[in-house]
């Protein structure tokens, strides 16, 4: 089986109709979102969710984000505290996932939540939201790539990786944010950052007036996607905080200043020549894929500031550079 590809920039209605048909068959569909491309399936159908795990080769203890059409749909499945509601009203639709208590008999299958009594919920922008509304059920949707590898920001990334395992890929162009959603969990007056992402932590703190707590050390419990130590990994090894290039490495730079000995690199890329973190986030996964395609054994990455979206970029890079999970 080789996936059909429908470009919704020229045929949006056909894309929604075809995607709904495949989803109704209990099969996953690769869909564009503003963050990355997602591998979406009916969050209430256990066989459909199983196909997500099988297609990605994803561990079943790693929960899936359930995507909703809007806040009203989300309220049908989860319980909102006042702070979570304020965050939803401020940042949805958008790249923010909230970990919330499941409502009894919610209909979301336990396979999607990895058996937890909580669920990660996000309302995406654009096509994905329209698709969920047309389908009428929430969609569980991790990134549309082999588990642990680089997340896709273009339909071609999906087709090259999973095309022979899928029936349908929806092409919506390049994902504008380029990194996955920020994941937070509200517990009383505390807001915990489980995964930095497309909404900067500082933006959340500004809205709530509460400092976000960040995890200390490795997470003992997987509460949300993207918490595995090794994730987003290319085939090459990744060397971080590179202030000089070594012969034969592929170099990924950031900003206008070249690192020392950059001429020694076998190939060079720049996440953002102007030093713009939003541009760097949008380019991150595509540039990692291009760097990996050079065939170098090591990808060296220049230092990235750790504020704003830089926190999400550095999180992805640290997991890409981590010892590989087996």
Image: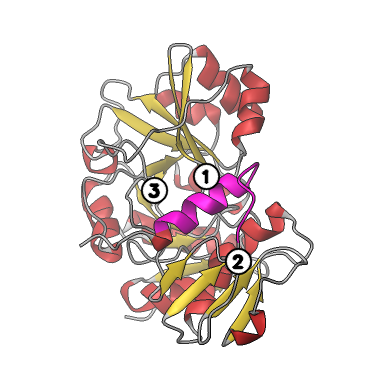
Q: Earlier in the sequence, mark 1 or mark 2?
A: 1
Neighbour tally class for label 3: few under 14, some 14-19, many 20 plus, Cα within 10 Å: many
Does the magenta run of residues contain 314? yes
What residue lies at 59% left-to-right and 57% top-to-bottom? 178
Measure the C-alpha gap from mark 2 to mark 3.
Answer: 27 Å
- Residue on which the image places disc 3: 226
- Frontmost residue, 305 versus 43: 305
Give x and y (percent) for residue 97: 49, 36
Q: Which stretch is magenta?
A: 303-319
Residue 154 visible? The answer is no
With respect to residue 175, does 197 lie above or below? above
Measure the C-alpha gap from mark 1 to mark 2.
Answer: 29 Å
Q: Which mark is residue 243?
A: 2
Give x and y (percent) for residue 28: 35, 60
Identify the image quadrant of the C terminus: bottom left
With respect to residue 295, does 187 lie above or below? above
């Amino acid at each position: 089986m080789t996936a059909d590809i429908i470009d919704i920039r020229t045929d949006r209605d056909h894309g929604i109709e075809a995607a709904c048909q495949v989803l109704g068959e209990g099969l996953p569909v690769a869909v564009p979102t503003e963050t990355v491309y997602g591998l979406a399936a009916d969050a209430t159908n256990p066989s459909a969710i199983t196909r997500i795990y099988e297609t990605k080769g994803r561990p079943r203890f790693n929960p899936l984000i359930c995507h909703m059409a809007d806040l009203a749909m989300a309220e049908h499945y989860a319980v909102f505290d006042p702070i979570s509601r304020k965050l939803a009203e401020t940042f949805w639709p958008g790249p923010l996932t909230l970990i919330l208590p499941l409502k009894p008999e919610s209909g979301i299958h336990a396979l999607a939540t990895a058996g937890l009594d909580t669920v990660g919920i996000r309302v995406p922008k654009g096509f994905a939201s329209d698709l969920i509304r047309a389908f009428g059920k929430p969609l569980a949707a991790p990134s549309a790539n082999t588990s642990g590898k680089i997340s896709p920001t273009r339909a071609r990334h999906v087709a090259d990786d999973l095309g022979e395992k899928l029936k349908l890929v929806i092409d919506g162009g390049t994902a504008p944010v380029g990194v996955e959603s920020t994941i937070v969990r509200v517990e009383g007056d505390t807001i915990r950052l489980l995964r930095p992402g497309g909404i900067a932590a500082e933006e959340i703190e500004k809205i709530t007036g509460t400092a976000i707590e960040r995890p200390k050390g490795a997470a003992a419990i997987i509460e949300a996607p993207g918490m595995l130590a090794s994730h987003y990994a290319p085939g090459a090894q990744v060397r971080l905080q590179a202030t000089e290039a070594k012969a034969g490495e592929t170099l990924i730079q950031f900003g206008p200043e070249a690192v020392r000995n950059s001429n020694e690199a076998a190939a060079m890329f720049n996440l953002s020549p102007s030093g713009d973190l939003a541009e760097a986030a949008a380019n991150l996964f595509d540039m990692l894929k291009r760097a990996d395609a050079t065939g170098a054994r090591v990808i060296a990455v220049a230092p990235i500031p750790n504020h704003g979206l830089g926190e999400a970029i550095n999180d992805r890079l640290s997991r890409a550079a981590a010892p590989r999970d087996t």
